[in-house]
Amino acid sequence: MQLAGKAALISGAGGGICRAIAVAFAEAGAAVACCDVDPEAAAETARLVTAASGRALSQACDVASEAATRDVANAAHDAFGRLDILVHGAAPHDPSGTVIETTLADWQRVLDINLTGAFLLSRAVLPHMITAEGGSIIFIASQLGRVGSAGRAAYCATKGALIQLAKVMAIDHAPQNIRVNTLSPGAVETQRTLNRYGSFAAANREIGPKHVLGRLGRPSEIAPA
């Protein structure tokens, strides 16, 4: 993977998967703008990017805000002089529950970040990519975008929608040399997994056997994709 001279914007950059992606991009030569609703987490990822000899920018961003997504895209373009790659990986903790048990506020927050966030960030970066005559947009979806899981209505719905959104955008922007793809990991050892299962050991006991390797994935295994 060679990304020398390229610039990327990564949402959810303070989390496990997107932090690993940010460092992998830096090691491949890219400049990386790290955005996250948690500014300290974004700053730590930016520090790791710098340690990997990459140029870095960190900025707090709620991807559910149109103004915030526009600001972070412009800040990244201003800092690096270009914007070639968008990775949207921001995702909130989604409480388990059936549709009866899920509050409207929880449902809406998952949609706002997982799906509307992808829409807003894409709207913010696409003009820069179109001007540059090319780019790559990657949404972090999930295997739960294709299969159901009990008590995960909002999460499954949004991840399935991301896969479809990417297909439509890939068609719409292929003439402008912009690729749009999704990654659909299984369960991965991240803070979100700890929030749900309490420990990686517990998660591996409960859902590890559902994976062909018999264990959860690791962020470093997702980053190269």
Image (spheres, grey):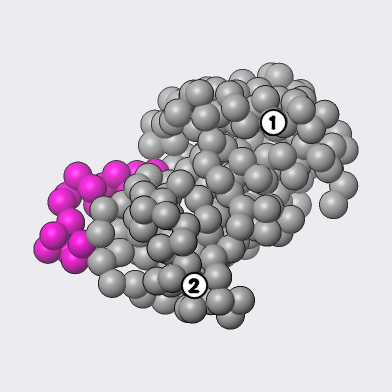
Give the amino acid type for the residue marked by disc 1 in the picture.
Leu
In the image, is residue 156 above or below residue 104? below
In the image, is residue 146 above or below residue 6? below
Give the amino acid type for the residue marked by disc 2 in the picture.
Gly
Which residue is rendered at x = 84% and y = 37% of the image? Answer: 29
In the rendered structure, which segment of residues is drawn in magenta?
97-116
Give the CA distance from mark 1 to mark 2. Answer: 29 Å
Relative placement, left or right, of 177 versus 138 is right
Horizontal and vertical percent position of residue 77: 68, 25
**Residue picked out by circle 2:** 208
| Residue reaching furthest to the left | 100
Label 2: element kind: helix
Q: Which mark is residue 148?
A: none
Image quadrant where residue 150 sits: bottom left
Q: Nearer the viewer, residue 45 or 174?
A: 45
In the image, is residue 32 above or below residue 97? above
Which residue is rendered at x = 19% and y = 66% of the image? Answer: 98
Label the magenta part by its dominant secondary structure.
helix
Label 1: element kind: helix
Q: Is residue 107 magenta?
A: yes
**Residue picked out by circle 1:** 48
